[in-house]
Amino acid sequence: MFKNIIANYIGKLWGLISVFVFVPFYIKLLGIESYAVINFYTVILTIMYFADGGLSATLNREIARSSDKLYIGRMLFTIERVYLIICSSIIIIIFCFSGIIAKNWLNSQTISQEDLSIYISLMGISVAFQLFTTLQNSGLMGLEKQVLSNGIQVSSSISRSALVLIPLYYYPTLSTFFIWQVSMNIIFFFITRYNLWKYIKTNMSYKFDKQIIKTVGRFAGGMMLMAIISSLNTQIDKLVISKILSLKEFGYYSLAGILSQVPVLLITPIAVAILPRMVKYSANIEKAKLIKLFHVNTFVLSALATSGAMVLFLFTKDFVLIWTHDYVIAEAIENVTKVLLIGGVFLSFQYMPYHLAIANGHTKTNVRLGIVAIICIIPSLIFCVKQYGLIGATYTWLIMNVFAYFYLGYFIISKFLKNEFERWLINGTLIPLIISILIGLISYFFTINLERGYYVILYSIIIGLISLVLNLIVFNKFNPDYKINLKKALRDGRL
């Protein structure tokens, strides 16, 4: 598992690097409004994940649970046919509504509605192929071929994020950007699909199997509802801002949102790597192993998320200046980023309960929470954005994630790991949070008069490592049964 975690980190690290390195070039070559259109593409991609219907998560889970290649092959063949219908529908629907979205949603001062409509249509094609590739990657993850999967994803990201700068340098238009995205997504769809089938295919021929859809349908249906709700809950703030405010302000909010994703980006590689093992422990009713895996990795994720968020919170303006070299942007998004970072920490706390639910095929709790959140958050967002602008959206996001953290933690852990909620709450989340806050406060007074600029990166590394080490010492002290031995973990290749 350790090798898979490292592979996942390389994939996520490249994703992080690509964002921080290339976004300033996009803004420089195309302008902040055009960058906002690019980010709207990301919003549509995230929202369209609901069209997945839970099939990617289902494929991952079923492959992790089964060693029968014949069954896996029939299931993949069947799900691919369903996916073909889904992705074709996405292209048609977005194409039909592109003009309406361009006219009634995006408020641009420099881009015509006709051009926006074309860009949105190209987004639809690109989104469809990227979604299909997500399905194939989920299969590779379920096979624990995460090194291969991340290698393909990094190559795809390099092609889409870095190499696109070459044609953009000569033809700096959004048409160039989106045509390139469509081309790369088509190419890497076929590459990913070929590699997945290479590990699954047998000498048998496959046919569409309705029984497989019935067998996994309940779990897939629950995951579909979770995907719809999750997409709306994570992107509704951006949708409201893109509708109410200008594209320029939407661009600012998008930049702040990128920085606020750092806590989640830090933990996702571990969370993804341990999910197949959680599935196996749950399926085989190995409760002792599941409890240990759950608590140890809850702590690891929380320590990483809180430490990363803490150093970014301390030096928000400095990091934005280093990143964009634009003082106006740094001033505009500093406070917005800080509040979003806190929300990101509480979102990261939800990952282990969420994966515990998936490992047990449970979706009801997440669906109920999501429905309540959507009902409450949409009117709250509209009111807060109209009254307070960008900062109003951040408070709504923060309150929603704090509530979801307590709700999911209590109900899911109480259901599947009885009497373990208190340990998760205190040892797994609150202690890492308190330690990181204390380290942050002390660090603030030590660094307040120190030289800024690129030195901030050095300060952040030192402070972050101190926070992680102190967290580890405290965890081992209060959890002797789950003591983490880093030397042994590195030697054995697992956490």
Image: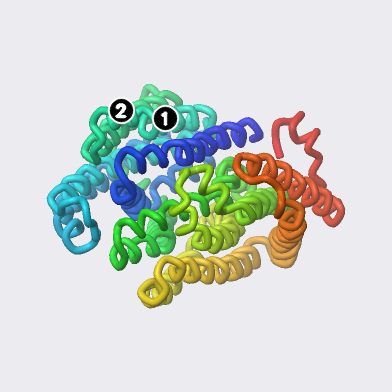
Quarter assignment of residue 127: top left
Where residue 184 sits in the image (x, y, percent)? 31, 31
Q: Is residue 286 visible?
A: no
Up the image or down, 238 lies above or below 487; here it is below
Where residue 130 sits in the image (x, y, percent)? 33, 40
**Foreground disc of the pair 2, 1:** 1
Q: Which residue is disc 2 drawn over?
A: 187
Q: What residue type is disc 2 on?
A: Ile
Q: What residue type is disc 1 on?
A: Ile
Where residue 162 sits in the image (x, y, percent)? 39, 30
At a point 39% along the width and 37% down the height, the residue shown is 25
At a point 38% along the width and 57% down the height, the residue shown is 224
Q: Which residue is disc 1 drawn over?
A: 158
Up the image or down, 113 lies above or below 493; here it is below
Q: Secondary structure at mark 1?
A: helix
Measured in 3D between alpha carbons, the distance from the residue under mark 2 to the one under mark 1, in whole angstroms, is 13 Å
In the image shown, does 242 or 479 lie closer to the viewer?
242
Q: Secondary structure at mark 2?
A: helix
Q: Earlier in the sequence, mark 2 or mark 1?
A: 1
